[in-house]
């Protein structure tokens, strides 16, 4: 059963981003719109990824998932690093909340933000292409798993980073390359063999590929394989995050 | 019942021994002072009690609950006012207090939250964002956050640092009330007059160790008596009173004529004896002052290593 303390922390973390929704929700939706307008306009009709699927429709699904991932990461990581640096994390650390509850609350709030932005991106971009929903359950599963993974990564980054600079490095040198090299804008089968192999090592690729399967019923990889890889990745990250919280690494000195 | 039991607690930061085997027992309902200069280890000890820092060795329990192995029960039993003036800029005062209450499993706690705000003069700031508050007001919210779950043990780490007289009076009135209602209070402060006025028992820390632990009254009695300051217009101090002299000023050291002596007095009865001896010797007293030893004298003596 969910404790009141846990529910309060989820509420607080959700309220935190809601209070600055222009920055945390509206801005990333606008950014995704700009990506669509530019890349969609330039590449529509020149790139055919899946038979019967327009490039704009392909791009929209990629942008939605990219928004889910980036915003899930941003929520937990920015909340933690801000709380650490300003010192108000003490209000959470002084409470009877367990490491499990802290992990789950930060991750769930991150998922709420990621999925809210993703839904917002879909709502404003879906008008530009004919969208299909071949397997809605797969859409939901990969959106949830992707948000959970990036929320957990944000938590790990927030625990590890001791200053904003370190968090920015984590974001710019790890999250951004993994996101952009995951097939958001293209099918990895259009890549040379070396980069195709490298892309298969990128867990973000499986999240986006599985997510697209839910829309188009077509993907580069069997969705069950993607599900297994993404689930395993989430378990490993969750165990790491919980271990860090339990040990008090860089939180309880 | 023991409110806080601290047993052989050690904490080291690389080469610095922050706490070197501290043991203390604070009973339920006490108003306890933890005193010492900067770097004595007070905040480290409080942080260990609060679960913010983990000890290298030793144990701490609150109302019988170990702060590491039984942290949930231990943290529910304690409210800590941190020394740093920290706040969450996203929320109003009321939101801050409701959230803090919720973390402790009390979602519908508005009656007590209103009472705490009322007692700390925060009611008219309830819907103000934390960023818009003055330093003193933020300090009040910190105190309110520590009290929001009605903990039986309240730890105040420098609660009046840099705040005005009004807050001090408001705070001490409320904390005294809570203490009378049975809450255990642990206070660290650099304002020794506050500690002397509020605390019934004190521990003095120096370089990570407890160097004095006693009730306030016996500490003052044991370590340093009062001083009788006599300014003699004429005549001199009889020889048999010379062993009592703590300090003497004569001739050019004084702006007026005569001699001025500070005499050690352990009991008030001795004042009459001294005055009688001065009258017998023919000395004429120009000015007389009885100065009681205070916590500051004791603190300085102990920190200088001159007291038991």
Image: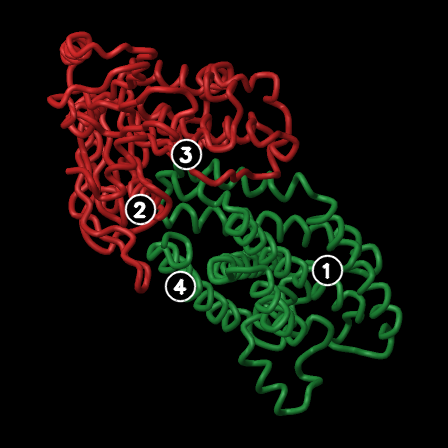
Residue occupied by mark 1: A132
Residue occupied by mark 3: B158
- B116 and B41: which is toward the camera: B41
Quadrant of the rendered image containing residue B93: top right
Residue occupied by mark 2: B41
The chain assigned the colour red in the figure is: B
**Chain of the residue under label 2:** B
- B134 and A142: which is toward the camera: B134
**Chain of the residue under label 3:** B
Residue occupied by mark 4: A240
- SS class of the residue under badge 4? helix
The image shows residue A173, relative to residue B79, as above or below, that is below
Decide which of tag 1 and tag 4 comes sooner along the chain.
1
- Mark 3–mark 1 distance (CA, rounded to whole Å): 63 Å
**Mark 1, mark 4: which one is toward the viewer?**
4
In this rendering, does residue A60 appear at all?
yes
């Amino acid at each position: 059963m969910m404790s009141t303390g846990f529910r309060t922390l989820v509420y607080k973390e959700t309220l935190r981003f809601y209070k600055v929704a222009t920055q945390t929700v509206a801005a990333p939706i606008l950014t995704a719109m700009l990506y669509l307008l530019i890349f969609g306009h330039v590449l529509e009709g020149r790139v055919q990824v899946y038979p019967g699927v327009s490039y704009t429709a392909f791009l929209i699904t990629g942008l939605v998932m990219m928004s889910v991932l980036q915003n899930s990461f941003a929520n937990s990581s920015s909340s933690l690093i801000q709380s650490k640096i300003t010192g108000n994390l003490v209000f959470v650390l002084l409470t009877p909340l367990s490491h499990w509850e802290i992990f789950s609350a930060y991750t769930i709030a991150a998922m709420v933000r990621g999925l809210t932005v993703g839904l917002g991106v879909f709502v404003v971009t879906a008008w530009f292409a004919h969208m299909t929903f071949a397997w809605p359950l797969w859409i939901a599963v990969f959106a949830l798993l992707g948000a959970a993974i990036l929320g957990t990564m944000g938590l790990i980054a927030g625990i590890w980073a001791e200053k904003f600079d370190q968090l920015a490095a984590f974001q710019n040198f790890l999250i951004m390359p993994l996101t952009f090299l995951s097939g958001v804008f293209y099918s990895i089968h259009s890549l040379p063999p070396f980069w195709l192999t490298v892309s298969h090592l990128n867990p973000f690729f499986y999240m986006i590929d599985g997510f697209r399967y839910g829309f188009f019923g077509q993907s580069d990889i069997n969705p069950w394989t993607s599900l297994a890889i993404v689930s395993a990745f989430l378990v490993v990250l969750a165990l790491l995050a919980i271990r860090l919280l339990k040990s008090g690494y860089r939180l309880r000195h | 019942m023991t409110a806080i039991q601290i047993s052989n607690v050690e904490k080291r930061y690389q080469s610095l021994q922050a706490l070197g085997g501290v043991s203390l027992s604070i009973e339920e309902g006490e108003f306890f002072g933890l005193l010492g200069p900067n770097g004595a280890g007070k905040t480290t000890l409080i942080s260990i009690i609060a679960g913010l820092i983990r000890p290298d060795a030793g144990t701490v329990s609150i109302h019988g609950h170990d702060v590491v192995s039984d942290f949930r029960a231990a943290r529910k039993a304690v409210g800590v006012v941190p020394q740093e003036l920290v706040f969450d800029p996203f929320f109003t005062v009321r939101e801050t207090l409701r959230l803090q209450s919720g973390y402790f499993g009390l979602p519908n706690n508005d009656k007590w939250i209103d009472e705490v705000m009322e007692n700390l003069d925060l009611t008219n700031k309830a819907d103000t964002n934390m960023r818009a508050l003055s330093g003193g007001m933020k300090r009040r919210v910190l105190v309110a956050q520590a009290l929001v779950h009605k903990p039986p043990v309240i730890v105040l780490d420098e609660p009046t640092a840099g705040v005005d007289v009004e807050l001090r009076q408001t705070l001490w009135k409320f904390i005294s009330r809570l203490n009378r209602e049975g809450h255990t209070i642990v206070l660290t402060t650099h304002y020794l007059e506050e500690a002397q006025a509020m605390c019934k028992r004190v521990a003095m820390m120096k370089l990570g160790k407890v160097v004095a632990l006693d009730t306030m009254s016996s500490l003052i009695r044991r370590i340093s008596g009062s001083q009788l300051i006599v300014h003699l217009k004429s005549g001199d101090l009889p020889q048999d009173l010379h062993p009592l002299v703590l300090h003497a000023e004569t001739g050019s050291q004084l702006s007026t004529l005569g001699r001025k002596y500070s005499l050690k007095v352990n009991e008030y009865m001795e004042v009459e004896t001294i005055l009688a001896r001065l009258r017998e010797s023919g000395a004429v007293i120009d000015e007389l002052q009885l100065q009681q030893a205070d916590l500051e004298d004791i603190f300085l003596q102990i920190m200088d290593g001159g007291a038991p």
